[in-house]
Amino acid sequence: MTSPTDHGLEQDAITLGGINLAFWLASLGLGKTWPVDFIWSCFPPLLCLLIIVREPDTGVCERRIVGCTLVATWGFRLTHNFVSRGGVGHEDWRYSDMRRTFGRHFWWASLFSVFLGQAAFLFSACLSLYGVLCAPEPLTATDAAGAAVCFGAVLLEAASDLQMDAFVAARREHRTDATVIDRGLWMWSRHPNYLGELTWWWGLYLLGVPAAAPGWVVVGPVSMTFLFVCVSIKLMEDRQRGSKGEAWIKYTRAVPSPLLLVPPPINRRLGKWLHAAESGEAARSPLNG
């Protein structure tokens, strides 16, 4: 059994904590928290390097090559997406909202609410990497499934982001009057990019971990599921509802699935059924009598 506690977990956690502290101090000088977004996409590849340098002779070479290639591809794409969208110098709206909420206390609160809070979720998900890179067991069908899930997740997230970028460009160039994206994967799910990111972490867990790691390592993808389903989606939906109003409500009726991919015809039927059910409940409400 390959436990992260046997392969330098404590010192890697301290390293991530140190990186967050350094980036937090940099954010104080910059007056914005955007440096934190680099940690999410760059720490997993760095962790792969740290593990391999520290233990060059453990693990299975083929699994290490597959794992490191997938992590590097995922990290490069995510970093490129952040930079190409103007992320450098731009503070994410979630952090700006926190800044307004905490007011003059944000400078110290951001260390916990923005940096270390995010780091806890990230490090828990990265626990899978110890099994991927250090497990002595030979490759199995689970490894193949994990690699396929990871690769598919990267493609899903990339396609979703490219379609959203094309829609934003069309709005900017006045080639569409739509306020909510109405094409591609975004008609299958309201958040296909989040689905891709969440699927990535489950794929990484599958990549050699179940047979070689203790059961508690599953806390990684489970915590990511909680983060996206219970926090990220709710924050994004509340923002979209507030800024786009009726257009967003119509979109949710056309695409009632917030995360899972559902074919558009089924989505539309499901949306009509849910809307009819809601209308019926409203009609029967004592407040309408």
Image (cartoon, grey):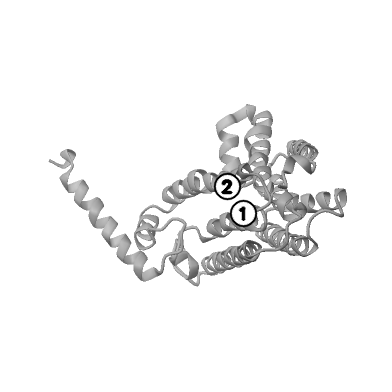
Give residue 215's position: percent from left, percent from top: 61, 44
- Above or below, 207 against 223 in this view is below
Secondary structure beneath dot 1 equals helix
The disc, 2 or 1, on the residue closer to the chain's N-terminal end is: 1
- Above or below, 20 against 199 in this view is above
- Above or below, 120 against 78 in this view is above
Snapshot quadrant of residue 30? top right
The residue tagged 2 is 224
- Residues under numbered marks 2 and 1 in contact, where contact means CB atoms less than 8 Å apart: yes
Looking at the rendered structure, the kind of residue marked 1 is Trp
Secondary structure beneath dot 2 equals helix
Q: Nearer the viewer, residue 164 or 133?
A: 133
The residue tagged 1 is 201
Give residue 46's position: percent from left, percent from top: 79, 51
- Locate the C terminus and report the quarter of the image it occupies: top left
Residue at the spot 65% in from the left edge and 56% down from the top edge: 204
Looking at the rendered structure, the kind of residue marked 2 is Met
CA separation, marks 2 and 1? 7 Å
